[in-house]
Amino acid sequence: MIDEIKIVDNFLPNDEFFTFKNIMLAEEFPWYYSGYKLNSFIFSDNKNYDYNFTHFFFKDHNKLSKYYDILFPILRILRPYAIFRIKANLTLHYNEVVTHGFHTDIEDTYKNIDTFKTAIFYVNNSDGKTLFKNGQEVDTVENRLVIFRTGLPHTATTHRSKTRCVLNLNYID
């Protein structure tokens, strides 16, 4: 299968995007500390950078967030057949750029992993990047959506900007 990466700029109409962004980056939005970036078994090369803040909207067939409804504009356009997981990640400023470990969002133990898609929605501008093992890079530009086959190994970099906020969706198209 070809490792196609689809990039859609200005994914949401401006009014829907700014409503979404203002909620996600509001002081009262609940973020939860995670002591690892990728999962509890895979760490980046520099463990000092292996943490972030997360917010799970959907996991294990359950809505986990009272903020789930803010996803409707995104889901309306994506039109997923089935949702596996929706999680937001918030990372903070670092003094140096470090690349985290390559990973896939869903383990290969799932049958037909190639039917799964991953979409990354960038909530704000940042100098952090999304890197793919095939050598492709995607800049963090607000209101940008990147879609790719979930089995395609990818990672993120740290950033010097104040924050980097992304929404990660794993679904069946």
Image (cartoon, grey):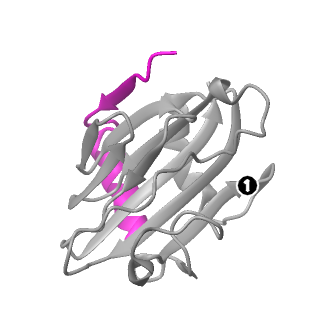
Choose top left, top right, bottom left or bottom right for residue 6.
top left
Q: Is residue 127 above or below residue 36?
A: above
Quadrant assignment for the C terminus: top right
Question: Quick one: SS at disc 1?
Answer: strand
Q: Is residue 61 left or right of residue 89?
A: right
Q: Residue at x 31, y 38 (%)?
A: 13
* Residue 32 coordinates in the image, percent (x, y): 57, 80
Q: Is residue 11 magenta?
A: yes
* Residue bearing mark 1: 59
Q: Is residue 78 above or below residue 128?
A: above
Q: How many residues crowd mark 1 within 10 Å: few (<14), some (14–19), many (20+)? A: some
Q: Is residue 133 above or below residue 39?
A: above
Magenta region:
1-25
* Residue 53 coordinates in the image, percent (x, y): 49, 76
Q: Residue at x 26, y 42 (%)?
A: 138
Which residue ends up furthest to the top in the rendered image? Answer: 1
- The answer to which of 141 and 36 lies nearer the viewer is 36
Q: Is residue 161 left or right of residue 6?
A: left
Q: Residue at x 43, y 23 (%)?
A: 3
Q: Amino acid at mark 1?
A: Lys
